[in-house]
Amino acid sequence: MNPILLVIPILSVLMFDLGLSLNLADFKRIFKQPKAATIGLLGQIVVLPLIAFALALILDLQPLFFVGFILIACCPGGSSSNIFSKLAKGDVALSVTLTAFSSIITLFTLPLIMSWAVTYANGGVSTAINLPVGNLLIQNIILMLVPIILGVLMKMRWEKAAQATDKLLSKIAFPALMLLAGIFFVQHYDTIAAYIGSLCICLTLLIIVAAGMAALISRVARLTQQERRTIVIEVGMQNAAQAIAVASSPFIFNKPEIAFPAIIYALMMNVVLLTYVGFIKYRHK
């Protein structure tokens, strides 16, 4: 089975579900909580890619993994971050706002950063890895922006149906992502097995360093405890489905190796952040 046939509907469903959870107040919140929202978005869109680039250089990743590593850091916040924020007793409303805004902003920042990443990985010459920027922008609009808009429209027109649909989709999102990861593992077992150790270390470091930096910046900015927890989770949990869609799409990279970091990241981000949530619950007890 071609993984792209599974990742496209998964990504579209995740974005549609995000739209179902949005309302006008979520977009106004960026003006009501400007400091927290700004720090959260800067952490995701600026700080995270910089951390990823630094780690990729230090750990000397090969070109395809380098591109996949940077790709993860350029993606917006994952939809599951809202659930994790709730479990961590964070600011769930802020989490929804950050996920929504990062999903829209990265439609344009992702092509810019990835164009540079591909050129860097190729040693300044656009040969080994090709990135059709126009196709990337079009795919992101179709698979991300359009489903979000449809979800928002459904909620505006049929609120009760939207709430019921949101409740159902939120339960199947994570199992669907794990199914996708499982298919990739089976189809590319030999290659993934050969690099899983080094990639696990790289991606775990990325999540821990990014979350730690988010916690530090949030504390220096004197945000509330709820806001700090939410920003840690938002910066540490990116949309792995989008990274896989970009990497494996026949219209963009069409290279499964670029998707390997996202596959492993999908697992490690849940392990690390569930540990973080567990630590918070332990402290409360």
Image (cartoon, rainbow, N blue to C red):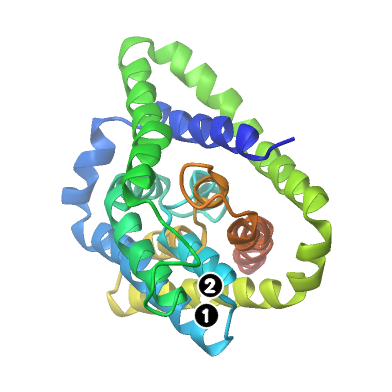
Question: Which mark is drawn over residue 198?
Answer: none
Q: CA distance from mark 1 to mark 2?
A: 6 Å
Mark 1 highlights which residue?
56
Q: Quadrant of the C terminus?
A: bottom right
Q: Which one is in front, 215 or 191? A: 191
Question: Looking at the image, is 152 positioned above or below residue 205?
Answer: above
Total labels drawn: 2
Whether residue 257 can be seen here:
yes
Asked whether disc 1 touches disc 2, contact meaning CB atoms under 8 Å apart, the reply is yes
Residue type at mark 1? Answer: Ala
Residue 32 picture location, percent across and down: 18, 49
Q: Quadrant of the N terminus?
A: top right
Mark 2 highlights which residue?
66
Question: Looking at the image, is 6 positioned above or below residue 158?
Answer: below
Residue count near mark 1 (Cα–Cα under 10 Å), binned few <14, some 14–19, many ≥20: many
Residue type at mark 2? Answer: Phe
Left or right, residue 16 beside residue 269: left
Write the residue at 64% across / 60% down.
Answer: 257
Q: Residue furthest bottom?
A: 58
Which image quarter: residue 267? Answer: bottom right
Residue 246 picture location, percent across and down: 49, 48
Q: Which one is in front, 222 or 188? A: 188
